[in-house]
Amino acid sequence: MEEARLVQRARQGDFGAFEQLVTRTESKIYGLLLRLVGNPEDARELLQETYLSAYRNLDRFQGNAAFSTWVYRIATNHALMRFRKKNPETVGLDEIPVPTHEEIRERGVSDWDLDPKEAVLQKEIRGLLNRAILDLPPLYRAVVVLRDVEGLSTAETAQALEITEGAVKTRLHRARLFLREALSPHFEDARDDRQGMR
Amino acid sequence: MTRKLSCREILDNLSAYVDAELDPSLCEEIEAHMQGCNPCVAFLNTLKKTVVLVRYSGEPEQVPQEVHIDLHRFLRDRCKDDGPGKES
Ligand SMILES: [Zn+2]
């Protein structure tokens, strides 16, 4: 059955239709939550909270976006709320340690001798990446996961996180610089061919 | 083009450049800069590789069977009686 039809029936109280919507989207949402919180136990609980909240708010779903996009938003909100409870001071953190232009210039830049699509097949490298992503403050992590892992647009990410598109872009850039920095020591060319920036 | 961009300005705009979110004129300036600046080329390459690594970092997650079962049981228990759209 078409998604819009399922939503309509779920709204009219057809619980089976709602369950079908859940089944269609739960893997995606679980994957998102796992990346946001980093552990299966929390992801499992948040998954339940997310869909309960989706059910209770079904009348607010506009139907102009995909059901899954709407649930993404709920899931991200619940994950961020949990971070706020646990660790209020780190959620909104404005500054994250990224190298300044001066530092990069002094150190020099060298290319990485790897094919990223092949590299991610290695368990060790995936572990490295996931740790680096989890080292980001939650709001930065949410931006990078929604944009670069889940492939949401800047506008969709801004909506999901209730921040401006400008803030999405700034945070995404800083998060990528942070991740690049975390990965650099592992991937830099063995050959000593660093080149200084001007 | 009135002046040359510095490496710092390139660096600040590199994510937007990778995402094709910049004005064409600024893109052209960045590309012109890249012609003569190997460190910026290396930085761009490694930033692009970072983005690709992140994109493919997660295995496609299939929700585990017991999580699926738990979720549906939880929802049946909690939702059945109150009906949809009733924020409590
Ligand atoms: Zn340069």
Image (spheres, grey):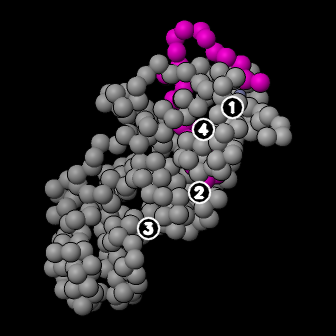
Chain holding disc 1: B
Q: Residue at x 24, y 69 (%)?
A: A22
Image quadrant in which you'd find residue B17: top right
Mark 3 sits on what residue? A73
| Circle 3: residue type | Arg
Q: Secondary structure at mark 4?
A: helix
| Circle 1: residue type | Ala
* Disc 1 from disc 2: Cα separation: 27 Å
Q: Which residues are magenta?
A: A169-198
Q: Residue furthest right?
A: B2
Mark 1 sits on what residue? B32
Which numbered dot is residue A168?
Answer: 2
Q: Residue furthest front?
A: B1
* Disc 3 from disc 1: Cα separation: 40 Å
Whether label 3 touches label 1, CB < 8 Å: no
**Mark 2 or mark 3, which is nearer the start of the sequence?**
3
